[in-house]
Structures are given as structure tokens and as C-alpha cells.
Amino acid sequence: MKNILLLWGVLCLSISCQQTNKSSVDPTQKQTTLDTIQKKPNAPFGIVIHGGAGKIIKENLSDSLEKVYHEKLSEAISKGNDILKNGGSAVEAVKQSINILEDSPLFNSGKGAVLTHEEQPELDASIMDGKTLNAGGVSGVSTVKNPINLAYEVMENSEHVFLSGKGAEAFAKTRKLTLVDPSYFITKKQLQNVRRIKQKENNKQASFYNPDLNGSKFGTVGCVALDKNGNLAAGTSTGGMTNKKWGRIGDSPIIGAGTYANNATCAVSGTGWGEYYIRGVVAYDISALMEYKGLSIQEAVKKVIYKKQPQLGGEGGIIAIDHLGNIAMEFNTPGMFRASYLNDELDIKMYQKE
């Protein structure tokens, strides 16, 4: 009997030692593995941009104009990709990519933006940091050369999220941003557009004109990015609708509607009919579908752009990237200027069947 009790005691002691060793070793091993993943030199990163969605069909674009759009999209996204590749932040990549699009008269943002009923530019923009959920938005500015830069300053150097009009421009002066005369933004093309629409309005044929959806090749611009540290960011910049009145504001400068970023889920930028994107809280809705319903980035974007938005009456497009580097570029219009840069591969598309 003594031998049996002794054997039982030795067995219990052995099991206890094994359990103690496991509990002391496993946490360290798990932490080491986690650190190795976090410090991996080739961590995934990526960037996606858009230049507007609408009636973009090959028959409406000459070969030379198609080439110009291709080159500008390539220039913009390559700038952001270089920043990410060299270890820069997603926020900086978004801002600088959008700067290039804002400086081009090809798009409805910055120079070349559409004009109001009074034939003046009123520019909107927003940016969001997925790491901190900090964000900045501006609307109705007409003297700030790059509205996305002002949105960034609101995010980083003010206690506010959203500034508008003269107040936003006064803040821009304190941040020493590049200011221009409103005439800088006005192009002959957009001046002709607004006057043509005003003439139709006088004939009661149209009250406003959305260039992203009615045949014009100009469009709102946006960018989403994931950097090597796993941080997401999103930004959007626009001139809004041609012939807009009464200080109309669309979805682009509104966090959760046209722009949203959260490291736990995704970064989103939209382009299209702003009133419907605001009503649907589109950008945040995509993140919420991922967080609360467990959908993938592709599933969430498709559900919103092909089911939820059409039920409201909204048309347009969405670009998004999740925290793992998966992307979505979807639109319910004939085309969308879009590009992605992932794993050193540049992909630029314009039309629906590409």
C-alpha cells in the first residue's frame, strides 16, 4: 500500500511540474511570435485611389485623353506607394496622393473643380487616421490651394473635426498653407459647364448638375492606404456639384459618409451622389458591417454599393482597403477612374468591364 501511495505522489508531482513549466513558457513564446510578426520587415502595405465614378465609357474618351488620365492616376498612386514602401505613414501617403489629383484640372477637386450657381469654387475635403480615429474635414473653401492639406491641419492641429467657409480659410492662414485667388480653380471647361446648366435651368430642364454621374469626365478624388505599421487612413476631396446653391455640402467632407478609417476594420473613400451617401452613412456602414456582422471588405462594399445605395436612389463608387491589405473597388455606374498598388503591382482601370 505504501508503494502505491508513493507512486501516486510522484505522479502528481510530475504532472504539477509539467503544468507549471507550460504556464511559464507559453506566454513568452506567444509574445515572441507576436513581436516577430509585428517587426517583420516586409509587412503588407497598399494604396488605392479613385478619380470619380459616373458615365465613364470608352466611347467618350479619346485614346489621347485616356492616356492622360492613366498617366495622372499612375503619378498620384505611385507617389503614395513610394511613401509607404519607404516606411512612411498611411496618412501622409493619402495626403500627398490626393495633392497630385487636386493639382490636375482632370478632376473635380482643387484646380478644375466644378463651380457654383454664382460661378465660384467651393471646395470640400476630409481625412481620417485609422490608428487614432482622429479626423478633419473642411467645406466651402475657395482660397486654399489644396483642401486636403487644410483637412489634415484641422485633424492634427486643432481641437475640432469640421471647419467651414471663412473660418476654415482663417485657420488655413494660421497654419501657413498655400493660398490662392479663387480664379486659380476656375477652368474654361467648368465655366462653360455651369453656364450651360444655368441656361437649362432657366428653361426648367435642370436644376443642378452632378459631373460624376451625368457624362462629364471630371470626378471627386479619394485615396485609402495601409502602411507597414498596420495603420489605415482615408481621404476625399471634391468641388461638389455644378450649379450647387446655398452653400450645399455633399458627403466628401463628412466623416462616416464619404470618408472613414479604423484600424480594426478598413479605410473607405466614396464618390457619387453625396446626398445619398450622407443618408446611408456609407463609409461607416461598410466598417460596421465588417465589425458587427463579420463581413469581408469585398462583401461589405458590394452589399452597400449594389444593394443598400440603389434602394435609396444613390449612384457612385467606393474604394476600400482593410487592415490585412485586402481591397475593394466597386461602383454601380458605367465606370470609375481607379487604381491600386499592391505587392509592387500597379493596376489602373477606368471602365466597367476591366
Image (cartoon, helix red, strand yellow):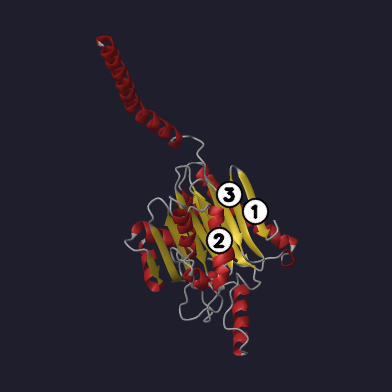
Please name which of the two marks, 2 or 3, marks the residue nearer to the observer: 2
> On screen, 90 above or below 188?
above
State the separation of the CA atoms marked 2 and 1.
24 Å
Q: Which of 3 and 295 is in front in this view?
A: 3
The circle on residue 78 is 3
Q: Report the number of discs.
A: 3
At 36% from the left and 29% from the top, the residue drawn is: 28
Location of residue 331 by image quarter: bottom right
Instruction: Confirm or deny contact between disc 2 and disc 1 (CB under 8 A).
Output: no
Q: Earlier in the sequence, mark 1 or mark 3?
A: 3
Under mark 1, the amino acid is Ile
Please name which of the two marks, 1 or 3, marks the residue nearer to the observer: 1
Compared across the picture, whether 81 is left or right of 179 comes to: right
Q: Is there any visible trace of residue 106 in the rendered image? A: no
At 37% from the left and 71% from the top, the residue drawn is: 167
Give neighbour class at mark 1: few <14, some 14-19, many 20+ (Cα, 10 Å): many
State the separation of the CA atoms marked 2 and 3.
30 Å
Under mark 2, the amino acid is Lys
Compared across the picture, whether 7 is left or right of 188 comes to: left
Q: Earlier in the sequence, mark 2 or mark 1?
A: 2
Please name which of the two marks, 2 or 1, marks the residue nearer to the observer: 2
State the separation of the CA atoms marked 1 and 3.
11 Å
